[in-house]
Image (spheres, rainbow, N blue to C red):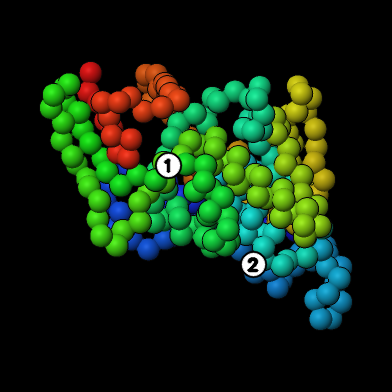
Amino acid sequence: MRLIVLVFAFRFLLLRIVSPFKAAEPSTCHSQHKVGVRRETAKRPSSSVEQDGDGEGWKLKIAIAGAGPSGLLLAHRLIASGLPLEQLDVFESRADPRSSSSSLEGRAYALGLGIRGRTAIKTVDGELWSSVKARGYECERFRLHLSKKISLQLRGREDGVHPSVLIYQSDLCSALLDELERRAKALETALNVRFNSNIAMANLETSTLSFVSDGVTQESKKYDLLVGCDGANSIVRESIKVYSPPDTFECTKRELLPGCFKVARITSMPPALDADSVALILP
């Protein structure tokens, strides 16, 4: 079986809150690989997939590594594309963010969706954006608090500019998951999101994934397309390096910054702060 491997990094999903909303047009960042990767359109199915002369009868088995915003948005695009999907599997090392017992580690932070994030989600349709938007809070202003009495407005309302949407990463993924499962069911797409499944290796010779679930290492079925949306320290990217000739593929790991990052969630905005502004408070 010939395996097609892609590694995506949808950097336009995240827009720094303090940046102006007048951003450049949406763009994607695809990792460039010298060997071991072929990018092909949907009209050229894997050679292992049976098809007749007009392209009917062939089915695709696709695996996505990572159920973060980029992986889930890609799953939406695949389901909406009309491609003949036999199976769409999404592997995620963390628990389901919608679970009441789910840890928020790695998902607790808030992010701002501006023109880039909004445009990316709307490439599926406006209904998906409405579902995401309902989970967050619109914000047009950014205020820096130097003390109890001194504050500076760093950004205000701009005519003709849509406000950004502030949303927790867990809520963003929950909204995307809810809509993904609903749409897959309506279209009778075989979707399987495997939480608590930590990918250990992508075997490009057998077209399979090795993953650990409940402490047990398992081997997946064979896939026609494997997409890496598993973050900065991507296992899929590392696997490409393993199967590449020497000195033809570079892969570096991002080291974690020292220190501690904590997120406090409050039920309501303190009365001294503007509920429609992002507040940066200096100690």
Residue at the spot of label 1: 137
Q: Nearer the viewer, residue 257 or 138?
A: 138
Kind of residue sitting beneath label 1: Tyr
Q: Nearer the viewer, residue 5 or 244?
A: 5
Q: Nearer the viewer, residue 156 or 272?
A: 272
Q: Which numbered circle lies on residue 40?
A: 2
Q: Is residue 253 visible?
A: yes
Residue 54: give x, y in percent of width and height. 81, 81
Kind of residue sitting beneath label 2: Glu
Residue at 60%, 47% in the rendered image:
176
**Quadrant location of the N terminus in the rendered image:** bottom right
Residue 95: give x, y in percent of width and height. 66, 29
Q: Left or right: 120 with respect to 73? A: left
Give the Cα distance between marks 2 and 1: 39 Å
Mark 1 surroundings within 10 Å by alpha-carbon count, few (fewer than 14), some (14 through 19), many (20 or more):
some
Q: Is residue 210 above or below residue 21?
A: above
Q: Is residue 51 above or below residue 123?
A: below
| Residue sticking out furthest to the left | 150
Residue 125: give x, y in percent of width and height. 57, 62
**Quadrant location of the C terminus in the rendered image:** top left
| Residue sticking out furthest to the front | 271
